[in-house]
Amino acid sequence: MVIRVLTAIVVTLVEVVRQDRGLIMKNKFDKFSDMSIKRLKDIAQDCFHSIYISECFGSKDCINYTLACNELNKRGYDINEDRNIHIEKRIK
């Protein structure tokens, strides 16, 4: 019982922080193609941490991570994953 309560508190705090950082899309009409590079990087890094580091994520995190990485890739960025995510501009 205590673990469930603590888990709920942590999840709530994470959501508050993510909302404060602007990482949660405000509405379903937000488009990744309209987002700035900084916002895309923030979303990708936040979702990567949720999925692979803290292992506390939902399907929306997986979808947002994939969409942000795809958009960054279209804009010429390489994404390298290890214990951390590295996003770098490709050199032509």
Image (tube, rainbow, N blue to C red):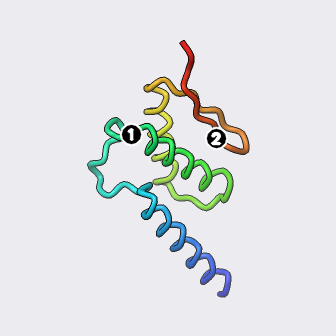
- Which amino acid does the dot numbered 1 rest on? Ser
Q: Horizontal and vertical percent for residue 18?
A: 48, 61
Give the secondary structure at mark 1: loop
Q: Does residue 16 lie above or below 59 as drawn?
A: below
**Residue 29 image position (x, y, % from top left):** 26, 49
Residue at figure coordinates x 62%, y 52% from the top left: 49
As displayed, is residue 16 above or below residue 28?
below
Tell me residue 20's x, y (percent): 44, 64
Query: Could you say which is closer to the camera, residue 38 or residue 74?
Result: 38
Q: Mark 1 points at which residue?
A: 36
Q: Residue furthest top?
A: 92
Q: Identify residue type, mark 2.
A: Ile
Q: Position of residue 80 (x, y in %)?
A: 64, 33
Q: In this view, does 1 lie to the left or right of 24?
A: right
Q: Which of marks 1 and 2 is nearer the N terminus?
A: 1
> Which disc, if any, is residue 2?
none
The local crowd at label 1, few if under 14, some if 14 to 19, many if 20 or more residues have their Cα within 10 Å, is few
Q: In which quarter of the image is the C terminus?
A: top right
Q: Nearer the viewer, residue 87 or 74?
A: 87
Quadrant of the rendered structure where residue 89 is? Answer: top right
Please identify the residue farthest to the bottom as the structure is shown: 1
**Label 2 crowd (10 A; few <14 / some 14-19 / many >=20):** some
Question: Which residue is more in the foreground, 74 or 35?
Answer: 35
Relative height, residue 15 to residue 64 (above, below):
below
Find disc 2 in the rendering and name its residue: 85
Q: Is residue 66 left or right of residue 83?
A: left
Q: Distance between the residues labelled 1 and 2?
A: 18 Å
Look at the numbered disc 2 and give the secondary structure of its residue: strand
**Residue under the point 59% across and 48% down:** 48
Q: What is the quadrant of the N terminus in the image?
A: bottom right
Choose mark 1 or mark 2, whichever is in front.
1
Q: Which residue is drawn at 51% across and 73% down?
A: 12
